[in-house]
Image (tube, rainbow, N blue to C red):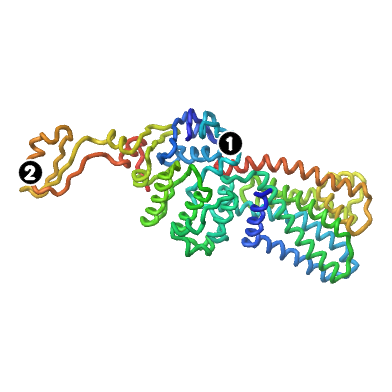
């Protein structure tokens, strides 16, 4: 759906490029995650794809056509959820949504969206009285107002409690299952793990690695299983290779004769992969 | 046109909620209060003078306040990712401030006519308000682009007021009489607006009136083009450039 080739961008006041020969594709019907440390160019990439930034070098194709060849009708197809909630603070939640809905000539039910994220009862309240989480949820559903084919979501669950984060994640998955495509940037590796069909790690304005989370975990993890069991010395932990595990006498001895406490494959986490690829700790 | 009507409804709703329209209304009442304490013979000349000051200042200030609210709250960014065109956005700002200026006209002329018995050509008053307010809305937009905050915009506007408005007022009260200055004042949009207001209450040379209208229409057209180009750059800044 999006094809990005040799994308290069430099902010006017900078001396170096923020994006350097960035290349990736986003396939129709997938949730594509773009990850990387702060300042690496994730938001810049999203701003280019949402056409908030122009003046780039390289090629960005949307549905096979140059992104810049589209008129304003492009925004009838895409929904954008900004990282920081952006609302008219002195209007109510309902008034905010109604204003944007009219601009899209949309027939989406605002009440349904508000009910889905638990804001229906607060729809008549001024947004300035909302908590951060409420603003985030309102921000999120505004991206759905035009029944988009493509969603841009920047840290969609940031600042939400687990229950509300779950609701938003379910909505993203439903959107994908109904044929929608999602471009997601986030620092929350649990979100990436749950949502993304493919992820790309960015460092210094380039894509360092791109694959589906499962393959990345297999690639960067170890083909081993660790077993915690009771022994004469107390609790003992041993690690075994997954290769020919069923014929490994030590492993067989442990599972036959010992009381097993835990048993885990040693596949790595996305957080470990993030740190390994980018060299930066995850803060989220 | 469809988007403009939707944008306009939203703009007027926000002007009301953010008390921007109320601010304009209060200023109008202050003008009425000022007129109230004057003898009727002074009201006739001062009423158009106050209208001139209002129309040459308030639209620029109102549009700047609205734009800064939208920028600071980020709602401008949200609008930039909708199908509205930049021209529609600017047109909405113009129509909304002209609407506000027409309310001012109704209040001031309403008082001057019904309370103080002043007669004026309403058509000329309306032409002056529409052209003057539209022109100064565009000027306000241009002065807002590139400024960090409202104070910065006001500083720029003060320069405009000193260069264009003050000499017009000085000419109006007879301080500036030299022919060179009077010719130079033909370059001032403020004077063009003042001339149209004057035409509503006294005899003014037809050439002057036509010149003022053409000046504001053509100048407004040029300002619109510049404001449109400037808005594209302003919008990029919302993207972080």
SS at circle 1: loop
The residue under the point 32% across, 41% down is A270
Please give left or right for residue A26 compared with residue B20 in the image.
left
Q: Position of residue B61 (x, y in %)?
A: 70, 54
Q: Give the class, few, some or many, for how many residues have Cα within 10 Å of label 2's Cα (few <14, many ≥20).
A: few
Q: Where is residue A55, by image quadrant?
A: top right
* B144 vs A22: above or below: below
SS at circle 2: helix
Front residue (pair A217, A238): A217
Number of on-image labels: 2
Determine if residue A3 is in view: yes
Query: Where residue A181 is drawn, which disc sits there?
Result: none
Determine if residue A182 is in view: no
Query: Where residue A256 is drawn, which disc sits there?
Result: 2
* A147 vs A249: above or below: below
Point out the tag, 2 or 1, that comes first from the N-terminus.
Answer: 1
* A78 vs B48: above or below: above
Q: Position of residue B146 (x, y in %)?
A: 64, 44
Q: Are marks 2 and 1 on the same chain?
A: yes
Front residue (pair B196, A23): A23
Q: Which residue is mark 1?
A: A70
The residue under the point 56% across, 38% down is A53
Q: Position of residue B206 (x, y in %)?
A: 93, 49
Q: Position of residue A218 (x, y in %)?
A: 27, 35
Name the chain letter of the residue that bears numbered label 2: A
């Amino acid at each position: 759906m999006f094809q990005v080739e040799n994308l290069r961008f430099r902010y006017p006041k900078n001396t170096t490029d923020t994006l350097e020969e960035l290349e990736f594709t986003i396939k129709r019907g997938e949730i594509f995650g773009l990850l990387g440390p702060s300042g690496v160019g994730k938001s810049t990439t999203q701003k280019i794809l949402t056409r908030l930034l122009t003046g780039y070098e390289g090629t960005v194709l949307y549905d096979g056509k140059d992104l810049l060849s589209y008129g304003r009708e492009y925004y009838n197809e895409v929904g954008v959820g900004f990282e920081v909630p952006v609302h008219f603070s002195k209007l109510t939640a309902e008034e905010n949504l109604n204003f944007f809905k009219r601009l899209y000539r949309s027939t989406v039910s605002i009440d349904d969206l508000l009910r889905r994220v638990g804001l229906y009862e607060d729809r008549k309240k001024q947004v300035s009285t909302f908590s951060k989480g409420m603003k985030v949820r309102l921000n999120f559903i505004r991206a759905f107002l035009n029944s988009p084919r493509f969603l841009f979501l920047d840290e969609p669950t940031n600042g939400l409690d687990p229950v509300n984060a779950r609701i938003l994640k379910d909505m993203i998955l439903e959107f994908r299952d109904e044929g929608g495509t999602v471009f997601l940037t986030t620092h929350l590796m649990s979100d990436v793990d749950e949502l993304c069909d493919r992820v790309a790690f960015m460092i210094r304005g380039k894509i360092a690695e791109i694959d589906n989370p499962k393959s990345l975990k297999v690639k960067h993890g170890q083909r081993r299983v660790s077993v915690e069991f009771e022994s004469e010395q107390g609790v003992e932990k041993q690690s075994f290779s997954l290769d020919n595990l069923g014929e490994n006498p030590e492993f067989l001895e442990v599972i036959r004769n010992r009381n097993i406490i835990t048993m885990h494959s040693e596949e790595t986490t996305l957080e470990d992969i993030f740190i390994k690829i980018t060299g930066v700790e995850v803060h989220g | 046109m469809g988007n403009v009507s939707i944008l306009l409804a939203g703009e007027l709703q926000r002007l009301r909620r953010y008390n921007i329209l109320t601010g304009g209304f209060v200023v109008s009442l202050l003008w009425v209060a000022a007129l109230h304490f004057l003898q009727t013979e002074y009201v006739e000349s001062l009423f158009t003078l106050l209208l001139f000051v209002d129309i040459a200042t308030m639209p620029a200030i109102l549009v700047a306040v609205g734009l800064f609210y939208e920028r600071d709250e980020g709602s401008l960014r949200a609008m930039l990712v909708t199908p509205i065109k930049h021209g529609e956005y600017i047109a909405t700002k113009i129509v909304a401030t002209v609407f506000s200026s027409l309310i001012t006209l109704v209040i001031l002329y309403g008082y001057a006519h019904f309370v103080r018995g002043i007669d004026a050509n309403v058509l000329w008053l309306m032409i002056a308000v529409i052209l003057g307010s539209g022109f100064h809305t565009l000027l306000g937009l241009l002065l807002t682009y590139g400024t960090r905050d409202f104070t910065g915009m006001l500083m720029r506007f003060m320069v405009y007021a000193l260069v264009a408005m003050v000499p017009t007022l000085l000419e109006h009260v007879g301080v500036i009489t030299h022919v060179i200055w009077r010719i130079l004042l033909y370059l001032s949009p403020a004077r063009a607006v003042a001339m149209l207001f004057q035409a509503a209450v006294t005899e003014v040379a037809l050439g002057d009136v036509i010149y003022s209208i053409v000046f504001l229409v053509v100048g407004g057209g040029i300002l619109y083009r510049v404001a449109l180009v400037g808005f594209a750059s302003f919008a990029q800044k919302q993207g972080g450039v």
